[in-house]
Image (cartoon, coloured by chain):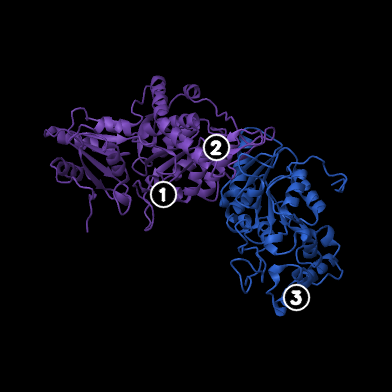
Amino acid sequence: MYMIESGNVAAATGVQLARTQVIAAYPITPQTPLTEKLSEFVESGVLDAQYIPVESEHSAMAVCIAASTAGARAFTATSANGLLYMHEQLHWAVGARLPLVMCVANRGVGAPWTVWNDQQDSMSQRDVGWIQLYANDHQQIIDTTIKAFRLAQTVSIPVMVCYDGYLLSHTYMPFDKPDQEKVDAFLPPFTPRHFLDPEDPGNFNTVTLPDIRPGVDGTIEPGYMEIRHNLHQELREAIEVYQEIDREYQEQFGRGGTPLVEEYRCDDADYVAVCIGSLSYQFRDVIDLMREKGAKVGVMGIQMYRPFPDQAIVAALADRKGVIVFEKALSYGNQGPLYGDIKSALYSCEKKPALSNYILGLGGREIKTSQLIDALTEACAGQAAEDAPRWIGLKL
Amino acid sequence: MDNKATILNLTEEEFVHPGNRACSGCGLSIVYRIGLKALGKNTVLVVPPSCLTVMQGLYPVASTKIPCVNVTFASTGAAASGVRGAMKALKKDGVNVVAWAGDGGTGDIGIQALSGACERGEDIIYICYDNEAYMNTGIQRSGTTPQGVLTTTTPIRGKLQEKKDIPAIIAAHGIGYVATASAAFPLDLYEKVKKATTLSGPRYIHVHTPCPPGWNFATRYTIKVGKLAVETGLFDLYEIEDGRLTLTGPSKRLLGKKRKPVKEYFDVQGRFKSLDPELVETLQGRIDAKWENYNDQQQQ
């Protein structure tokens, strides 16, 4: 069924179709309409779930952590400072290996206050161990949300579904709402092996020693480091798992096929622009315009940022003359986080593409097609190949 | 309660294994053992960082036969709400969802999440064991450390400020059941926890919990010290239901009677050794005024 709705409602609809059982959220712009929609779904009976209107984002994640530990499918959503306020809880959720899903409507972070879009919020959480998926339009928001629940419970690792605040969260686009029966077939109920059960009591997230240690029956159990190593290994395996899940989704629903990266006119491109989120779609106009003038350029959007799909990225970028990374986030005092990751992935290539990095759109600064053309043209001419990021659109 | 709890009719089933990691003379180990007996098997615990985290054992060994989720410091009230939310979503009835935290985890870093849970009317029992400082990290002052107490962050003059009244703050949320109890009066504690299990909505029990290393007294005096706190009228045992405070048991028996001077309580603990006589007098005065008020209310 086709709907014309906002990106936030696309996300809420995905959460509803996933038969989420416990929802906790604290309103923050631009996530708010998603929270409102979910409370409406629950209150009207469209979704049979518990909606817990918590007093903070820290508590929102606490509710999700505890509900998931007790065996329920749980969801929350946030933006910007709300996500940062959850930071401790994000680590906790992944360490506890809980299959949570959280939508992040990307927004710049304070100070100074901004409510407008960039991606500093989720990018600054890249090292917590959550899987990070980015959607580029409303259809991808609803599809990715449904796939995220399946991925999270397959690998027992929480998944963040990120989409640009306002640009996607508040704009209206048509998208297909999948049939409930098909979603039910694709996403089985959450049936954890271990949960808070008075019939089979366990102590979850106990203090764990540096070394391995025998249990009461003599079995040697892992120490903290083994547990963390397992997390890393299984995060790496999640790249393959998500590709399989996406293949299955494509078979069932006819959409997908670009779970890790999404390329546009990259086949014969000498220069490839790389970015995350809706910017990669805005860039398609840039590519078309430059192609008309004979430039062999393409754009690649990163759809899975953590775990980092380095093999797919190397395969896509290794033989290019140049790779130009455009980012709405910055590792302050260094360079764009995605740029650093791509440079690291390409280090092992024999023929290394020239690399350059642009920072743009922070705090909602408008990004003009002409600016992107100028930057890409400059980079193609070899004038921007240096580590220090160049800034697009600074006015003072 | 139809039957008064006595040492003879407490359930024999133990939910805390021996050999746990509590210190000798730990007041919490009494509160925990008796509290779990009152709660019974059909219980889920939510525990933030505290002495209890350590007492329960280090992975992969646990000393408690009740399922427990350890959560972050500031999140206890919310996490308990999440467990209850899951129980409702999964249509599992009859489970006691119990948050169990120290005074710092309750009244300082955890007060926001607890306040939120109370305001939402969450169907949870919250038990705070109050050992009057951050004991697990090594006896630093907390909002619930009494005035004049030496801690590792009030090392010379003792704490300058008064103890924060957490049960009163929780009662101000208008929840159905607030009670205080003491590790030194386990049967009174048992009856209150048992009563809480028969009620619904947010229920809060604040338990005065002597701590030998933190309060600086010999491990054999845990009960003696706890009793003195009540008998001097410093820490009162009561229940608040429908906004009405009723003294219970040992505190009720003090109504209209002469209480022991609070100096007796201070003198048996090293943590009060820097109290000057003037402050002792002030503190005694506050206790006397409080009890005058209790006695007046009783006559009404």
Q: Residue furthest left?
A: A293
Quadrant containing the C terminus of chain B in the rendered view = bottom right
Q: Which residue is drawn at 23% across and 48% down?
A: A387
Q: Name the residue under label 1.
A: A80
Colour assigned to chain B in the rendering is: blue
Left-right relation of A59 to B11: left
Marks 1/3: CA–CA distance: 51 Å
Q: Mark 3 points at which residue?
A: B285
Q: How crowded is mark 3: few (under 14 residues within 10 Å), some or many (20 or more)?
A: few
Q: Which amino acid does label 1 sit on?
A: Ala
B221 and A195: which is toward the camera: B221
Colour assigned to chain A in the rendering is: purple
Q: Which residue lies furthest to the bottom in this view?
A: B278
Disc 1 is placed on an element classified as helix
Could you tell me if residue B245 is visible in this image? no
Picture disc at residue A222:
2
Q: Which amino acid does label 3 sit on?
A: Gly
Q: Residue at x 48, y 42 (%)?
A: A35
Q: Residue at x 36, y 54 (%)?
A: A114
Could you tell me if residue A246 is visible in this image? yes
Report in which chain the residue with disc 3 lies: B
Q: In this view, does A237 lie above or below A92?
A: above
Left-right relation of B59 to A230: right
Q: Earlier in the sequence, mark 1 or mark 2?
A: 1
Q: Determine if marks 1 and 3 fall on one subunit.
A: no
Q: Is residue B132 above or below residue A343?
A: below
Report in which chain the residue with disc 1 lies: A
Marks 1/2: CA–CA distance: 36 Å
Disc 3 is placed on an element classified as helix
A119 and A168: which is toward the camera: A119
